Image (cartoon, rainbow, N blue to C red):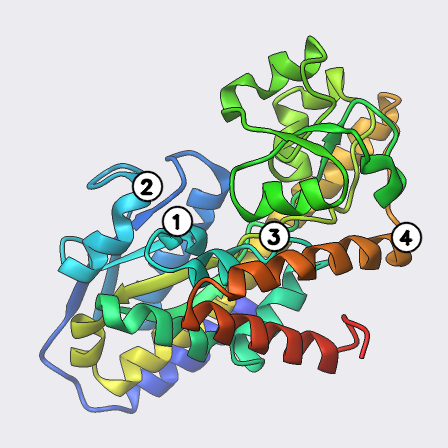
Amino acid sequence: MTFKKTFLATALATIAALPVLAQDFNLKFQSSDPAGNPTYIIEQEWAQRVSDASGGRLSINMLPVDSVVSYNETHDAVGAGILDGHITAVAYASGKDPAFALIGNTVGAWSSPYEMLRFVNYGGGKELMNELLNPYGLQFVGATSGGLEAFVSTKPLNGVDDLKGLKVRAPEGLVQKVFAAAGAAPVNLPGSEVFTSLDKKVIDAADYTVFAANHAAGMHDVAKHPVYPGFHSLPLIEVSMNKATWDKMPEDLQALLSLSINDLAMDMTSQLFMKDLEAVADAREKGIEIHDWSQDERAKFRAIAVAQWSEVASASANAKKVYDALLAYMTSQGLLAE
């Protein structure tokens, strides 16, 4: 029996033993992903499994990006009850508090999504997220991830020293600051201009997205020295809902929804990782030279990043809490030097 079938069978058996409750919960969630995107399809499948496992008592209507509000407005919409919940990048809330930027994409911190998910689930991240979100009327249910982003480059990059002078497209904020501290020359460009800018040598490299998406977009046709696995960016994707609605839900449905996020995270990280590996194999067949940094080089980049995290930590009391929790957890796991 597969893991999913076992999970559903156990959940159904548990719910069947409980008294039937009259109130059903029909929730409207918005994703930050477009319809047809592999990540959005995974989210739709998760919503259906939740409905099945609850015997229909908990139904989630999963909507694609911009269906009700803009991608960067869902935190406000969920807090106001316009949406019941969302699946989105935590960093989209960074305008509310710098703490969201630091926990939402801790540049240079993680070498795999599972390191980040362990921090959230067992290292205090979940509690921190609720400290940050509850005042805005949101309840953090759990985390998932699209995976560790790759790095697109027209030049060979084998370590931190090769970043010096590199003209790299990177989003504003912490990512740009870390690359600048590493000696690169960050450039602010929209995603729609990355391919052309690489092709015309306006930039040398780009922080863009995961390897499979880069490959599908033809990035490796003009940038034949990708770094994979990546070393810089792994966004935290939150599953949150309106806190008032959450508080009305019976404990068994709260438990079911919380457990289901582990299922969603396993599905998303595993399926997207498989797509990355398929794209890597195809890229190698086409003569693309893939660079995999050593652990020593990754540690050097992380050390540079930590100094920039501390600047964000000084921007708010909540950011300092996130910074302290990250350092304590990463040190305990051997990810930072004592």
Looking at the rendered structure, the kind of residue marked 3 is Leu
CA gap, disc 4 and disc 1: 31 Å
* First of labels 2, 1 by sequence position: 2
Residue denoted by label 4 = 294
Q: Is residue 196 left or right of residue 92?
A: right
Disc 1 packing (10 Å; few <14; some 14–19; many ≥20): some
- Residue where numbered disc 2 is placed: 71
Q: Disc 2 versus disc 1: distance between alpha carbons?
A: 8 Å
Find residue 234 and name its label.
3
The quarter holding residue 176 reads: top right
The residue positioned 68% from the left and 61% from the top of the image is 306
Which residue: 37% across, 60% down? 97
Label 4, residues with CA under 10 Å away: few <14, some 14-19, many ≥20: few
In the figure, residue 21 lies in which quadrant?
bottom left
* Quadrant of image for the C terminus: bottom right
In the displayed structure, does residue 76 sit left or right of residue 266?
left
Secondary element type, mark 3: loop
Where disc 1 sits, the SS reads helix
Residue at 66% x, 35% y is 212
Q: Position of residue 154 (x, y in %)?
A: 79, 22
* Sequence-wise first label, 4 or 3: 3
Give the residue at mark 1.
Answer: 92
Q: CA distance from mark 4 to mark 2?
A: 36 Å
Q: Position of residue 90 (x, y in %)?
A: 43, 56
Work out whether residue 206 or residue 262 is closer to the camera in this orientation and state it: 206
Q: Amino acid at mark 2?
A: Tyr
Against 262, residue 295 (above or below) is above
In the rendered structure, the answer to whether residue 209 lies left or right of residue 88 reads right
